[in-house]
Image: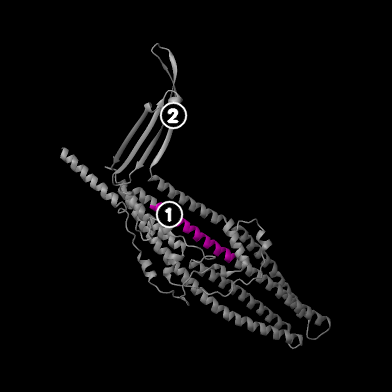
């Protein structure tokens, strides 16, 4: 019987020693999704005109006015504040996970009063005082708590990257809102110029008719006035749209309504020519914070699998206490009155009704789900870039054609105006060329807006910052993690 007990102790001791040296073996090794491998092997994008490597900066979209708005956004945005608070919660959760595997030391104190009968049958009051320390430590032989700590760290890093992704997205939305405001300002300026052009035509026609010229009739005056009124009627709607757009900026910037309107300058071209570094699709793994966060969450899920597996094995805990007891406060720390204890315990699951194994299956399924989400996020990122490149190429070609149409309409209008002043053309031809010129210029303005938005989409899809910033270093933030699943 004694030999059997010694054999069992040796077997248990060997198992614990093996687990102590390979405590991380319960966590599965990460498996790169096939989609990630395929995308990483691509050397360029389908629509790329340049393979120059580099990280794009969205600040090239606008000038100092937009840069000032981005500064306000970073300081005041409610959305960014919420994202930062969520990241802070994840960071504190990681600290809690670390604390759960470290030793704990608790101080206690107690004062009690009791009323009891003495030998003579009389009742008397007595007091008791106690103070002490309690020490607890979970040995974590099989690494379950360490796996939980690594999972929490990875999720905290993923939350930090999510903050970065949220900031990029909010800046892109801000840039588009600003481009919309600039576009409306340009349309408003155009509407006013168009109205003035129709006013000049109306006044010239009215002067001719009043002066008795045979080249102008009452009908011509009425037609010219109708076109002027129509042009003037477009202005209030554009002014309303611009005011509403500035209110949208106020909301995003967490400003009081009307504050952006006070500083809005307008009249700035929404986009200057920029060179776009494209690089390889594999660069998205480093540049896109949402892709990197998706990968970290997958690796964290693998650590959760390891933690769930560790629950199948015995757990060893150590505890010690030192307590002093006395009848008076002055004698409470009398070393002749102390009580000390030292205990250790081992618990092992025997029958859990399949609960522990079911939990492992849940964590494995979740890890597989997050691996799929990682591949889906990466694929969506590549498709975002492809769509942005395609849109940008098509819009640039379309704008060239619209520019040609505008140049033609401008020449036609100048010719019609000159012939009308000489009495060689009718009022209808002048008004028609004016309307054509107005439509052509509006199309150019809208094309500029679309191209600016396409640039913003491309910068965002490439993981571009507003300005360059230091990347979050996984190795520095988590020394136990090397980025490849090794611990």
Q: Distance between the residues labelled 2 and 1?
A: 41 Å
The residue that appears at 26% across and 48% down in the rendered structure is 17
Element at badge 1? helix
Q: Nearer the viewer, mark 2 or mark 1?
A: 2
Disc 2: CA contacts within 10 A as few (<14), some (14-19) or many (>=20): few
> Which of 246 and 114 lies nearest the eye of the viewer?
114
Q: Left or right: 460 with respect to 189? A: left
The residue that appears at 44% across and 56% down in the rendered structure is 157
The residue that appears at 57% across and 70% down in the rendered structure is 61
Q: What stretch is highlighted in magenta?
A: 150-177
Locate the C terminus by quadrant: bottom left
Image location of residue 105, percent across then percent down: 40, 39
Q: Read off the residue under disc 1.
A: 155
Numbered circles on residues, count = 2
Which of pointers 2 and 1 lies earlier in the amino acid sequence?
Answer: 2
- Displayed quadrant of residue 39: bottom left
> Which of 220 and 26 lies nearest the eye of the viewer?
26
Q: In the orientation shown, which residue stands out farthest toward the front?
A: 335
Q: Please tell me whether residue 27 is drawn above or below residue 56 in the rendered image.
A: above
Instruction: State the scheme by which the image is colored.
Output: one colour
Q: Read off the residue under disc 2.
A: 110
Image location of residue 292, percent across then percent down: 43, 61
Q: Left or right: 16 with respect to 41? A: left
Residue 226 showing in the rendered view: no
Element at badge 2? strand
Image location of residue 430, percent across then percent down: 71, 82
> Which of 472 and 279 lies nearest the eye of the viewer?
472
């Amino acid at each position: 019987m004694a030999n059997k007990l010694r054999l069992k102790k040796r077997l248990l001791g060997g198992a614990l020693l093996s687990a102590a040296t390979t405590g991380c073996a319960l966590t599965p090794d990460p498996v790169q999704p096939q989609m990630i491998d395929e995308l990483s092997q691509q050397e360029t994008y389908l629509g790329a005109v340049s393979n120059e490597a580099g990280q794009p900066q969205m600040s090239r979209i606008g000038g100092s006015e937009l840069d000032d708005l981005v500064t306000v956004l970073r300081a005041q945005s409610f959305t960014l504040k919420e994202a930062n608070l969520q990241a802070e919660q994840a960071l504190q959760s990681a600290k809690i996970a670390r604390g759960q595997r470290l030793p704990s030391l608790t101080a206690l104190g107690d004062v009690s009063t009791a009323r009891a009968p003495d030998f003579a049958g009389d009742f008397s009051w007595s007091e008791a005082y106690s103070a002490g320390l309690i020490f607890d430590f979970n040995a974590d032989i099989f690494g379950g708590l360490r796996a939980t700590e690594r999972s929490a760290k990875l999720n905290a890093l993923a939350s930090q990257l999510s903050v970065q992704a949220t900031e990029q997205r909010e800046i892109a939305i801000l840039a588009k809102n600003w481009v919309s405001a600039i576009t409306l300002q340009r349309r408003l300026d155009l509407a006013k110029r168009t109205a003035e052009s129709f006013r000049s035509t109306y006044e010239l026609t009215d002067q001719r008719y009043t002066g008795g010229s045979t080249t102008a009739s009452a009908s011509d005056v009425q037609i010219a006035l109708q076109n002027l009124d129509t042009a003037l009627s477009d202005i209030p709607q554009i002014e309303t749209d611009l005011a509403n757009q500035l209110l949208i900026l106020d909301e995003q910037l967490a400003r009081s309504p009307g504050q952006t309107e006070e500083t809005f300058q307008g009249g700035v071209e929404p986009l200057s020519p920029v060179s776009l570094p494209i690089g390889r699709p594999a660069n998205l793994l480093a540049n896109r914070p949402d892709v990197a966060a998706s990968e970290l969450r997958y690796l964290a899920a693998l650590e959760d699998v390891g933690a769930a597996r560790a629950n199948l094995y015995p757990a060893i805990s150590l505890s010690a206490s030192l307590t002093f007891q006395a009848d008076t406060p002055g004698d409470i720390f009398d070393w002749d009155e102390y009580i000390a204890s030292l205990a250790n315990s081992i618990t092992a699951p025997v029958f859990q009704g399949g609960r522990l194994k079911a939990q492992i299956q849940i964590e494995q399924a979740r890890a597989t789900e997050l691996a799929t989400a990682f591949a889906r996020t990466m694929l969506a990122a590549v498709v975002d870039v492809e769509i942005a490149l395609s849109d940008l190429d098509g819009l640039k070609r379309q704008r060239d054609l619209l520019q040609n149409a505008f140049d033609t309409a401008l020449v036609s209008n100048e010719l019609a105006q000159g012939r009308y002043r000489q009495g060689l053309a009718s009022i209808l031809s002048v008004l028609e060329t004016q309307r054509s010129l107005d439509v052509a210029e509006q199309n150019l303005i809208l094309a500029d807006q679309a191209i600016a938005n396409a640039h913003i989409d491309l910068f965002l899809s490439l993981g571009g910052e507003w300005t360059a910033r230091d990347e979050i270093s996984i190795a520095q933030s988590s020394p136990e993690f090397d980025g490849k699943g090794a611990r």
